[in-house]
Structures are given as structure tokens and as C-alpha cells.
Amino acid sequence: MKITLLGAGSTVFTRNVIGDCLGMEALRDSTFALYDIDGERLKETQVILEAIQKTIGGYGKLEYYCGVENRKKALQGADFVINTVQIGGYDPCTITDFEIPKKYGLRQTIGDTLGIGGIMRALRTIPVMKEFACDMEEVCPDTIFLNYTNPMAMLSGYMQRYTGVNTIGLCHSVQACTERLFQALGMEDKLEGRKELIAGINHMSWLLEVKDKNGNDLYPEIKMRVAEKMNDPECKDKVRYDYINHFGYYCTESSEHNAEYNMFYIKSKYPELIVRYNIPLDEYPRRCERHIREWKTEYAELMKSGIKEHKRSNEYASRIMNSVITGVPYQIGGNVLNKGHLITNLPENACVEVPCLVNGQGIRPCYVGELPVQCAAMNMTNVNVQLLTIEAAHTLKKEHIYQAAMLDPHTGSELDIDTIKKMVDELIVAHGNYLPKYH
């Protein structure tokens, strides 16, 4: 079996996923093809993976491919392809996504999923994903493509609608949702044996049902404890708790993410909201700089002390591949096209996040039905932006970029149309060759 990882210079993620695979009997003898365009980062990945390989028995074959000219070789005959690329990186593209909007008075926290930052990230990533798809359709047409790159719904939605590649979008937020909520609320004793239903869209899926092992609804207790937490000035999850108060349900992704997915919390006319809800503006740039520093330190320490073991991660990838190969069923939260109206009150061409059953037949999304009307309405404010961004990438019409930005809840609530168009134009120029030519 062959497993290809695109963006293998993302060393920590690659270490986790490939390390997980090397520890599973059904996967450990695979050929692992590691591809990146950054030779230095790929070399770091090689050093780490070969050390892990030795510590857990020397299983598997590791191959390394650097540069676009070697991408087809990396993909040739792959049974699974994992995507974790970041086009343009932190410097210059993420910096651009934050600094130019800031000039216009538009502040962001993460900027990788929605908002003007998410739109621009999608527009520079989709052309590369299209190239990936062309290669895969030629050299590994039956592969399963596991996409981890953000903006998840836009990228996965494009692949599912406009390519022939069997694509599933994967995120960390679904499997961590209830556990982190219960830990924060002091309800850890309710985790074992719980039953839950989570569905919606990526980074805004809803914890629709959660019951304890005896079938008791846990939302009344959650709401009681959340009311107490909202009075805590140190609480860092107030946006999502506020969702419970006003929309009735908790959602999957963090409060710093969700602060910018709507028009409610980051408002220049109401600066006191930033303090009240503990919203960390410009969080993603700080996080990137911290991760870069921490990785340099960690890598130096690993080179000095050596790698002794690999601790299994929480990533879905190895579990999905293991289930497909062995036939042992496994359930995930996956991002799939809403074909057949898996969620009945969201459009069929939307990319939705629903429970999926994985087995020897592949990945099968499950029917959810109707979301609470207010949850579907919140999702649609994001879906509108996602669909318009995909349309812009597909048609290369600049008007659709303008429209996506105009209809983005946060951007549209802060800026007028003329200013939005001026900001988009400046971003397009700043991104230069990272974007195709729009007309």
C-alpha cells in the first residue's frame, strides 16, 4: 500500500500521522511518499520520521520528493493522499491577510476559515489543489484524498464539486468538542459512555444532542454551568457559551475562531465587547510566530537527545485508512458534499460536516435531517461566503470575490461596499503570483 502526504514539510503534523501509521499493523509496512516544495523543511521531516521508524521496529518504506517536478512520482499509485499544504505560508501571505484589512479598520482573530483572510487563503490554495487533482486523476484515480488544509469547506467543497477525486475533509474540532466542553465545565464524570450528535459545517457544527450513558439529556446541566462561567472574567470560551444562550447549542470550533464568523462580537463601534468576551485579536499571527519558535527549539532538542518514542495522536487519518483496509468500522465527523440533502435545510452544493461511517467500502456520510432553524441560519451566513469564493475560484470572476467579501458577516458589518472592493483589490495585488488573473 502507498500513502502520500502533500505538504510533508509540516513536520509536526507529518510526524503525528506517519507515526500513527507506523504503529498500526495494517499500515506499518506501507510505502510513505513525503512531498513538499521546501527542501529544508522536508529534510527536517526526514530526520524525525527515520528516527521514529527506528524506535518502533523499522517498519515501512519512507520516500521523499521535493519540488513540483517530482509531485506525480510522489502520487503515482497512491491508495491514500493526505493534504496539509499552506500556500504562501505565514510570511508573506498570512501577514498580508491580516495587515491589509487592518488598514481599513477590519480586525481578525484567525483568518483561515471565513472572513477576508479565509477568502484569500482559499483563492490562493484552490489553484494548487486543482493541480493536485489533475495529477491524481492521472496517476492514482482511485485514491482517497484526505484534506486537512483550511479553509476546509471551501477547499473540500471545490474538490468535491469540480474534480473527480474522492475527497473527505477532516478537522480536529469534532472529536474534541464534547470532551473539552465537559472538562471546562467540570463534567468529566459524564464523558464515559456518552451519546452525542454533531452536525453542521466545518468550524460551526452544532452539538445537537448529548446524553449520558443512561440516556439523560445533559444540556440542562450544561446551560446551568455555562451561566456561571459567563460571569468569570478569565473564561476564554465566552463566544461559544453565548451561542448556547442565544441559539441553544454549543458549536465545535473555538471561541477565537467563532468570534469572526458572525457580525456580533468584533465591532469597531463596540470595543468593550473585545474585553467582555476575551477575544484575542491578531491571534493567528502570534500563534504562527510562537509555533515557529517552539519548533526550532524542539527540533534542536530532538537532535541533541534523540527521539525515543511516538505517542499516538488524535488525528483521524490513520484510523480511517486502517478501517478501509481492514473493514473494521469506525465513525468520524467528515466534511462532504451535501448530496441528497444529508442536512435537509442546507443547500446540496454546500460542504457539510456530518457523521460518517468508515469501513471496507470506504467512507459513507450519514443522513442527519433538519438542523434547528436558527443553527441552519447561522450556517448559511457562512455557506454563502464559501459558495461565492468557490465560484470565484472556478470562474476567475473578480465580482464573485467582491460578493463573497460583501456577504461575509464580519466584513459586511464593518465596511461599506466601496471600501470592501478597494480592500479586495489591494489584497489581490499584494498576493501577486499566488493568485491567478481575475477578470
Image: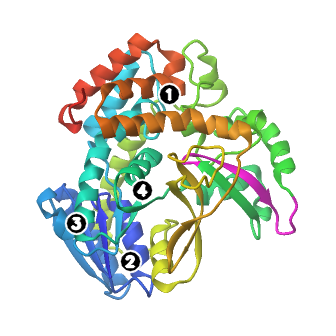
- Label 2 and label 3: CA atoms lie apart by 40 Å
Quarter placement of the N terminus: bottom left
Amino acid type at image mark 1: Asp
Task: Find out whether the residues at labels 2 and 1 contact each other: C-beta distance under 8 Å.
Answer: no
C-alpha distance separating marks 2 and 1: 47 Å
Identity, as a three-letter code, of the amino acid under mark 3: Glu
**Mark 3 lies on residue:** 138
Labels 3, 1: front one: 3
The vertical placement of 342 against 411, above or below, is below
Q: CA distance from mark 2 to mark 4?
A: 27 Å
Other residues around mark 2 within 10 Å, as few (<14) / some (14–19) / many (≥20)? few
In front of the other: 261 or 127: 127
Observer-nearest of 335 and 24: 335
Do the numbered discs 3 and 4 sit on residues whose CB atoms are within 8 Å? no
Of 143 and 63, the residue lying toward us: 143
Residue at the disc numbered 4:
148
Going from N to C along the chain, the mark reached first, 2 or 1, is: 2
Q: Which mark is residue 408?
A: 1
Q: Is residue 214 magenta?
A: yes
Reading the image, the residue beneath label 2 is: 308
* Stretch of the chain drawn in magenta: 201-216
At label 4, which amino acid type do we have? Tyr
The numbered mark, 3 or 4, whose residue comes first in the sequence reads 3
